[in-house]
Image (cartoon, rainbow, N blue to C red):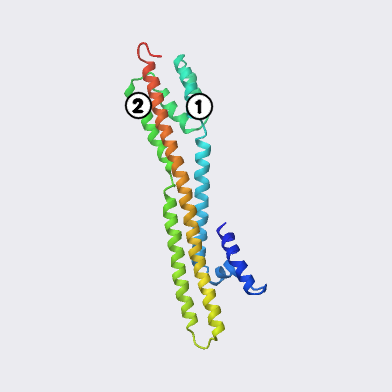
Amino acid sequence: MFVALLSSLGSAPAAAASGGGSGETGFMAAFKENPTFLSINLVVSAIVIALIVERAAFQLTKYRVNSKEFFAQIKKLVSAGNIDRAIKLCDAGDYPILQLVKAGLTHANKGPDEIDAAMSEKLGELKPAVEKRIGSLWSLANIATLVGLLGTVLGLIHTFGAVSAPGLSAADRQRILANGIAEAMYNTAMGLGIAVICMIAHLILHQRAKNIQHDLDATQERVFNLLTIQTRPGGY
């Protein structure tokens, strides 16, 4: 994605300036000239894409259960005294919400402290998995930006050194300078592009993770209240 964007930005002006010549221009020419820092950021971009896809898939698949609707079913079974059927319902899938509810149901015949301890322990296992690796996006954004900046600075140093070489014509100096600056700017553009993607993805994934954690907390409270009130004399 980043390579295609940078290539499209750089190839059209270069092709127009060369009069449609067949020489290689744009991002690929810069990559072949000095691939070190562009290669590092390509690796970073691959890690970023893999991380975003994995986290999005985790959130969309593991937390696709509607907790309110599921709790309504559990409430009917518990109110009717069918704790075993409620537990079997929780075994219907490997979803965190179901695991949390099951942790409370398996201790339904015990006191409030035992129920709360069991559900809190399960909640402590589930919550970290929701935020797992999302914070790494900020680090990857900083790494990509700094790698791009380092590539830009070293590219400019190399370019100015080449321009100062003796025996070059004015046209050659102009060509080397233009190509060197373009190569340096590709490093900056790629680093910033990766950083922007990281920030947007972090914003979306982190907000969704917070919503999921709030849903887990609400589910724990609902189940705890249901089980403790159910065991009281005159409870529903």
Q: Quadrant of the C terminus?
A: top left
Residue at 49 percent across and 69 percent down: it is 184
Residue 91: give its label: 1
Circle 2 — which element?
helix
Mark 2–mark 1 contact, CB under 8 Å? no
Which tag, 2 or 1, sits closer to the chain's start?
A: 1
Q: Can residue 24 be seen in this view?
A: no
Residue 45 position in % (x across, y down): 51, 56
Residue 232 position in % (x across, y down): 35, 14
Q: How crowded is mark 2: few (under 14 residues within 10 Å), some or many (20 or more)?
A: many
Circle 1 — which element?
loop
Residue 191 position in % (x across, y down): 48, 61
Q: Mark 2 points at which residue?
A: 116
Residue 58: give its label: none
Q: In which quarter of the image is the N terminus?
A: bottom right
Which of the two residues, 160 or 107, is positioned nearer the viewer here?
160
Which of the two residues, 111 or 185, is positioned nearer the viewer here?
185
Rendered view: 84 above or below 141: above
Answer with left or right where residue 103 lies relative to residue 21: left
Q: Which amino acid does label 1 sit on?
A: Asp
Rendered view: 79 above or below 99: above
Q: What residue type is labelled 2?
A: Asp
Q: How crowded is mark 1: few (under 14 residues within 10 Å), some or many (20 or more)?
A: few
Closest to the camera, between mark 2 and mark 1, is: 2
Q: Can residue 50 be seen in this view?
A: yes
